[in-house]
Image: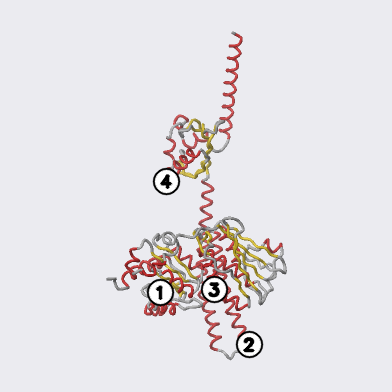
Amino acid sequence: MRKHRTDRLAGLVSSLTEADDSDRRFRLLADAIPQMVWAAGLDGRNNYCNAQWVSYTGLTFEQSKGWGWTRAVHPDDLQRCFEAWSAAVEKGEAYEIEYRWKRASDGAYRWQLGRALPVKDANGNVVEWFGTVTDIEDQKQMQAVAERAARTGTEFLCSASDELRSPLKAILDYAESMAAEFPEATPSQQARIEQLGAACRHLSKLIDEILDLAKVESGQVMVSAEPVLLDDVLRECRAKIEPLAQRRGIRLGFPARDTSCFVRADPMRLKQILTNLLTHAVTYNHANGKVEVSCKTPAPGRVRVSIRDTGMGLSPEQLAQLFQPFKRLGQQSGPDEGARIGLAVAKKLVELMSGVIGVDSQVGSGSTFWIELAAAQPPDITETGPVPPASSAARSPDEAAAAPFHTLLCVDDNPANQERVRQAISGRTDIRLLTAVTGQLGLARAFAAAPDVIVIDVHLPDVSGDEALKIFRNNPVTAHTPVIALSANATADDIQRGLKAGFVRYLPKPIDAGQLTEAVSFALEHRRNAAPKNA
């Protein structure tokens, strides 16, 4: 009996010794790594912290056992920390959070990355929490420097582009006036004039694409996620691409209308992506070729839009470089101009919308570009959809003022300008934005949605601003809708002439966000006072 007790005692002493030895080794290991290490009970109170913790916080182990250490967390981050901890405890899952923590040595707040894992028993119950805290201040500083550099670069490009557009427009106007004033010019002279105009248009497009790429690369482009009817987008894209296709003798084929096919995307950016792909399909095609657009569902919850051309096709080596800007892919001596920046922008925008872009191609057999996006349910347009209910066409100015939102229609064929309008009104939660890329589509959308304010480019290729204004005034739906003009050639005389014609504001391009928001506010007030009151 005595021997049995002695053996049990010896075993207990041995176990305690092993436990002590294991604990000592753990502490030595924890003190040797550069991160702060801690362990806590289910109530979140520390029961262990390593030497790095003590050194950074200036708190002893006894001081760190409670919640006293939270006083060193930046006040703006404390609530997020508690919310992350509470959510992790509730779910019994790991968490990761970035926050600022005061360093005891100099009182400076530094960014930290906190991670924690639950320790569970054999039954899956959480019995303890184990975590690390890593100093990421240097990475944050580098990230901030990179973001500032990107913003500076983009701002420089914007300024440079504005300086380039004026002389380009002057040269283009000169070329067009020469073609009109000298009809007796020889074919050779006419060809040179046309080449001059084409070069100016190409450079202007190139400036827009470079700006788009710079903004996407610098993270300055934000995309929304809302249900978008593919029919509407494809119809607008077709209207925009048809003039180019007709000049090149390219036949366009689009799918039959389907009012049930919605995708989750940013409507303006989706139009930009598809327009870029369609432009590429028409530009790099054979004369009198064909472009076919199709839509299908490759998997549940996914929608694929494919654009097939009858061009030269691409080799595997060319495909590997396809979505890189300024790659002509061996076509430098061909008749088609383009830096393929549009494809690079399209790829990045698709990925921002959690989509996929790809291409299937074979030399001599043409190419099929496709994008795949998440399918979406049709929106409830009477409550949260991007278009007000159809009954809004009959709203009076008083009823519009009492509505929970206002609708702004932007008619501009340049996606960059539409984006500037979107950003300018982003702070107005009471305004919903509709867009159209041609004058005809703008008129149709205005009569269908009865917007409260219309912003229109006065130099659209199909309908001039003056013509559109007359049509708006002669339709009872838009007779009292204030119209704001946008123009890249807004001289003092142009502004006076535009205001006299009936525009409530005449704004120059590039769009100034402050001017636009002030003009929209003025237009909404103008609308409330424009029409006679209902009896």
Q: Nearer the viewer, residue 62 or 22?
A: 22
Q: Nearer the viewer, residue 148 or 207?
A: 207
Inspect the image, locate mark 2, and give the three-letter code of the amino acid beneath it.
Answer: Pro
Residue that label 3 marks: 239
Q: Residues within 10 Å of mark 1 (few under 14, many from 20)?
A: many
State the separation of the CA atoms marked 3 and 2: 31 Å
Q: Residues within 10 Å of mark 4 (few under 14, many from 20)?
A: few
State the separation of the CA atoms marked 4 and 3: 50 Å
Inspect the image, locate mark 4, and give the three-letter code of the amino acid beneath it.
Answer: Asp
State the separation of the CA atoms marked 1 and 2: 40 Å
Kindly indicate whether the residue at mark 3 contacts the one at mark 4 (C-beta within 8 angstroms): no
Residue that label 2 marks: 187
Residue that label 1 marks: 506
Label 4, secondary structure: give it.
Answer: helix
Q: Earlier in the sequence, mark 1 or mark 2?
A: 2
Instruction: From the image, state whether disc 3 or disc 2 is nearer to you.
Output: 3
Residue 459 image position (x, y, % from top left): 48, 77
